[in-house]
Image (tube, rainbow, N blue to C red):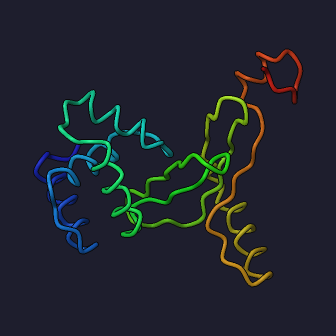
Amino acid sequence: MPHLTDTLHIRLQRLHQAGLRPTLQRLSVLGTLDTLGQDSFSVEQLFQTLRQHQQPISLTTVYRVLHDFETAGFLTRQWMDGHRASYLYHPRNVPGLVLRLVCRCCGHQERVDDPELLEHLRQQAARRGMEATGATLHGLCRHCNSATGEPGLKRA
């Protein structure tokens, strides 16, 4: 496990390289993202985690920091259901192509880490004159699928 000062130094360096002033709020959010262990998250999930760890930060500040981090390339915002934002964190500022499976019932998300598949998707997009940045496949997770009793049916 890296030493605390090494970790802080890395975070300070990332903020500096992105042209962001290393405020306590930005360091708190960045530290929480590094330890969250989730591929994607909502603003509410992040805010609750910060509050659980006694971080003095307002929801407005969380939104502002996430906007700064999105601009800097630390994360990518995606819209779920057309109106709810979900964020993907990029620990090393390398957005790349992200393929996610999303349960249309409970919203559970899984990232697909298959380099051959991702490369194939990149090539398909390039052939069509596009740059692929992400894709989402919707279905039912194991839990929701077993709760419905029949594959493919959405529970009420």
Residue 50 position (above or below residue 66) = above
Query: Which quarter of the picture shows residue 10?
Result: bottom left
At 76% from the left and 32% from the top, the residue drawn is 140
Residue at the far left: name it.
Answer: 5
At 19% from the left and 30% from the top, the residue drawn is 54
Residue 52, x across and y down, in percent: 27, 27
At 20% from the left and 47% from the top, the residue drawn is 2
Identify the image quadrant of the N terminus. Answer: top left
In the figure, is residue 144 to the left or right of 91?
right
Query: Which quarter of the picture shows residue 6?
Result: bottom left
At 61% from the left and 41% from the top, the residue drawn is 110
Residue 123 position (above or below residue 95) = below
Residue 142, x across and y down, in percent: 73, 25
Identify the image quadrant of the C terminus. Answer: top right
In the figure, is residue 44 to the left or right of 99?
left
Q: Relative to the observer, which residue lies in front, 20 or 63?
A: 63
Q: Relative to the observer, which residue lies in front, 136 or 6?
A: 136
The mark tally for this picture is 0
Residue 67 position (above or below residue 84) = below
Query: Which quarter of the picture shows residue 58?
Result: top left
In the figure, is residue 71 to the left or right of 8?
right
Residue 37, x across and y down, in percent: 41, 39
In the figure, is residue 40 to the left or right of 141?
left
Residue 68, x across and y down, in percent: 33, 64
